[in-house]
């Protein structure tokens, strides 16, 4: 990352896109407290993450941050209910069955609580992961390619769910390579060579794809020039 200055308002849905190697994952990891920047800083609702040690950062991530990954990261031996409640158990916090049931209903899995991951479709697994991210009532959800492993129909279900969460006040920061996925956000940030080089509010899939094509072409030209020197 180089000279990134970013303010994500509460209750917004931000998508991050860019060519391979542009810094998307690094930006996500720094923002989530998974990686410390070598310079500059990161604040979460006024909390300076630089001032926290690793134990404090881990506690912050468990209590104030939710994660949704491309690979679901569900434990195969646990039911959907147990997977959703896992962040609370790891933090030695009391679980509330009625709260878990409401979350599963919210993500469309009211009747799947006793199912294990192998009994669920890809889209259902990702919705369990979304419910797990919500169980701690986090300030922000970080989603890293949340639809990358899903078919088109399942991806749309998950994206509609993320859009609904944002509409009801949840802050979401999502890395994606898919212009259709990015079009569900409020604004798309485009990265190139570690910098934010463009922003697109109220995105459409067509507009996102057009800007990504320009960025990819520019990245390829830069790589060719470097190789020729």
Image: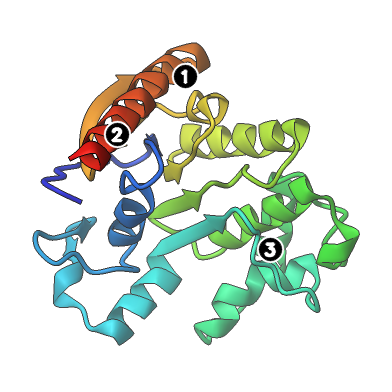
Is label 2 in contact with label 1 (beta carbons under 8 Å)? Answer: no
Whole-angstrom CA distance, mark 2 to mark 1, is 22 Å
From this view, report whether residue 60 is shown above or below residue 197.
below
**Quadrant where the image shows the C terminus:** top left
User: Could you tell me how far apart the alpha carbons at marks 1 and 3 are, in whole angstroms?
Assistant: 38 Å
162 up-or-down from 207: above or below = below
Determine the secondary structure under disc 2: helix
For marks 3 and 2, the one nearer the N-term is 3
Residue sitting nearer the eye, 167 or 150: 150
Tag nearer the camera, 1 or 3: 1
At numbered mark 1, what does the secondary structure look like: helix, strand or loop? helix
**What residue sits right under mark 3 in the picture?**
100
Mark 3–mark 2 distance (CA, rounded to whole Å): 52 Å
Q: What is the quadrant of residue 4 in the picture? A: top left
- At x 23%, y 37%, the residue is 228
**Along the polypeptide, which appears first: circle 1 or circle 3?**
3
Q: Which residue is mark 1?
A: 209
Instruction: Tell me what residue is drawn at x 76 percent, y 44 percent.
Output: 108
Secondary structure of the residue carrying numbered label 3: helix
**Image coords of residue 193 (percent x, y):** 24, 42
Q: In front here: 17 or 193?
A: 193
Seen as rendered, the residue at the extreme front is 228
Location of residue 207 by image quarter: top left
Question: Looking at the image, is mark 2 or mark 1 nearer the viewer?
Answer: 2
Q: Earlier in the sequence, mark 2 or mark 1?
A: 1
Q: Is residue 192 visible?
A: no
Question: Would you identify the image quadrant in which residue 116 lies?
Answer: bottom right
Q: Which residue is mark 2?
A: 224
């Amino acid at each position: 990352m180089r000279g990134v200055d970013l303010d994500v308002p509460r209750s917004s849905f931000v998508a991050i896109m860019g060519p391979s190697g542009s810094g998307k994952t690094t930006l996500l990891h720094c923002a989530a407290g998974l990686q410390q920047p070598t310079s500059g800083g990161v604040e979460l609702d006024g909390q300076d993450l630089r001032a926290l040690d690793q134990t404090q950062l881990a506690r912050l991530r468990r209590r104030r941050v939710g994660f949704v990954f491309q690979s679901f990261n569900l434990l195969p031996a646990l039911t959907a209910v147990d997977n959703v409640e896992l962040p609370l158990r790891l933090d030695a916090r009391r679980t509330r069955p009625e709260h878990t049931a409401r979350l599963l209903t919210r993500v469309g899995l009211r009747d799947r609580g006793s199912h294990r991951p192998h009994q669920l479709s890809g889209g259902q697994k990702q919705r369990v992961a979304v419910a797990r991210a919500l169980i701690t009532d986090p300030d922000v959800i970080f989603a890293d390619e949340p639809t990358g492993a899903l078919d088109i129909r399942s991806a749309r279900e998950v994206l509609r769910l993320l859009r609904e969460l944002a509409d009801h006040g949840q802050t979401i920061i999502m890395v994606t390579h898919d212009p259709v996925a990015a079009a569900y956000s409020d604004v798309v940030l485009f990265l190139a060579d570690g910098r934010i080089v463009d922003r697109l509010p109220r995105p459409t899939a067509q507009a996102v794809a057009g800007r990504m094509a320009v960025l990819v072409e520019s990245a390829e030209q830069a790589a060719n020039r470097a190789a020729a020197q």
